[in-house]
Image (cartoon, rainbow, N blue to C red):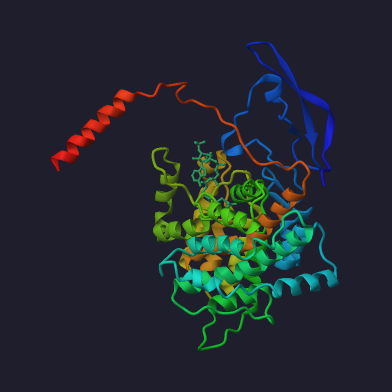
Amino acid sequence: MNKVQHENHTMTLTDDLTGKSVKLPVMKGTIGPDVIDVRGIYGAANKFTFDPGYSVTGSCISELTYIDGDEGILLHRGYSIEELAEKSDFLEVAYLLLNGELPNITEKGEFVEAITHHTMVHEQISTFFRGFRRDAHPMAILCGVTGALSAFYHDSTDIHDPHQRMIASRRLIAKMPTLAAMAYKYSIGQPFNYPKNELNYAENFLQMCFSVPAEDYVPDPIVSNAMDKILILHADHEQNASTSTVRLAGSSGANPFACIAAGIASLWGPAHGGANEAVIKMLEEIGDVSNIQKFINKAKDKNDSFRLMGFGHRVYKNYDPRATVMKESAHEVLEELNMQDDPLLKIAIELEKIALKDEYFISKKLFPNVDFYSGIILKSLGFPTSMFTVLFAIGRTVGWISQWKEMIEDPINKIGRPRQLYTGYKSRTYQIESTREKKSIFNWLWKKN
Ligand code: CMC
């Protein structure tokens, strides 16, 4: 941990008003831009930095994931996402993220065995579901029941014990598909399915979602491979909103199951994980290839809040490498399922073509992101749109918990506590008279009635 080299050089920040200067150390990682260590600014210059949305602020030191947004590169522990999606499987990637290295055969076997044997949830968890309205959004349910897991494992989760951290991490990776499938089954009024140990991670999730007591579910290898790939592509994405939420919640020493519930809440928004659901809604609204230009024009109109869902990214200013793999996978799956003529796929392909030639999208470097094609695959696999972000959450759980673990193990970890630029009143005197006036009006109204 902490392989950061402090560069010999510093950067000097000078206050043009007072002429006072502060020397700031420059930190160097293995790749990527150098980082200015601004921690000394307040002490030396009595000033904070301002960066809403944290566009240029590093909040931690991490060895997990690297993104080069200009080049469209995504690496997990140094391995490219394209290579992992092609050659690996989700549990192997999960092991890699958690432990830093790809597992050997014995390690892989032991990890798969451990995850498989943690997939069941306490039977009492199922009673939580009954508290939700039957039409509740599965993300609302997932957020609630994942938070509820913290009540089941609170006393056995000492976050300062590496063994207990490892058990909590494995429990979360193992139980998330079970909870997600239960949220789905509850929302469609079908009985919950228990996990089956003879199935792999993706197959088991599909079985828990699509099998019914009346008949057996036989997983289609193309479908389960596509599911596995979707999970790999969502496994981690450095310090995005939900991961930062997990880290921030965890920085206070909170229960990891509760921290992951906080991450799920953050993921739900349409600017983050909710975009895959929004993409399908948008494609359905477009309805026909002939309407695409109208929607492109809406997206470009400053006075219209509409945005092309599945386009643009805070970090990628090039094609999102996950979108490339997702697009290929969408074609494969639709071909296998004999759905090549899917009208939404046609609209998506045409929309992408038109947008990529449009000066607005070119100049703002807006390219398709991971969510642009994932919804099409998930829809063809039989998932309703409300489940799309839930599937994102299953994949991302390993990223969240690996980042949480890294944070807890990092000696520089301290509670997250941003500062602010205050623009409210300086000082005001409490006006007794106005309260008396309010009271007399209240008494008058009371008597009148
Ligand atoms: N359609 C039309 N215009 C856009 C879009 C879009 N999808 N995305 C950004 N812009 C414009 C935006 O209006 C702004 O224009 P201007 O500079 O004239 O004000 C400029 O591009 C920069 O946008 P921004 O909102 O300042 O950029 P950001 O980095 O804060 O936002 C984003 C990134 C992902 C929230 C945004 O691109 C967006 O809302 N995209 C649609 C939602 C979406 O697909 N989200 C999924 C993200 S990937 C999944 C994940 O990893 O979470």
Q: Which residue appears at 30% of the width and 29% of the height? A: 435
Residue 106 shows up from this direction: yes
Task: Classify residue 254 as left or right of residue 215.
Answer: right
Near-viewer residue (293 or 253): 253
Q: Which residue appears at 73% of the width and 26% of the height? A: 40
Total marks placed: 0
Q: Quadrant of residue 429?
A: top left
Near-viewer residue (331 or 176): 176
Task: Classify residue 174 as left or right of residue 99.
Answer: left
Residue 381 shows up from this direction: no
Task: Classify residue 370 as left or right of residue 110.
Answer: left
The outermost residue toward the left is 448
299 is higher (above) or lower (below) than 225: above
Q: Which residue appears at 72% of the width and 59% of the height? A: 82
| Quarter containing the C terminus | top left
Near-viewer residue (412 or 3): 412
The outermost residue toward the top is 18
25 is higher (above) or lower (below) than 416: above
**Where does residue 209 sit, x and y in percent of width and height?**
54, 75
**Where does residue 76 sit, x and y in percent of width and height?**
74, 54
Q: Which residue appears at 35% of the width and 23% of the height? A: 431
Near-viewer residue (314 or 248): 248
**Where does residue 266 sit, x and y in percent of width and height?**
55, 51
186 is higher (above) or lower (below) than 80: below
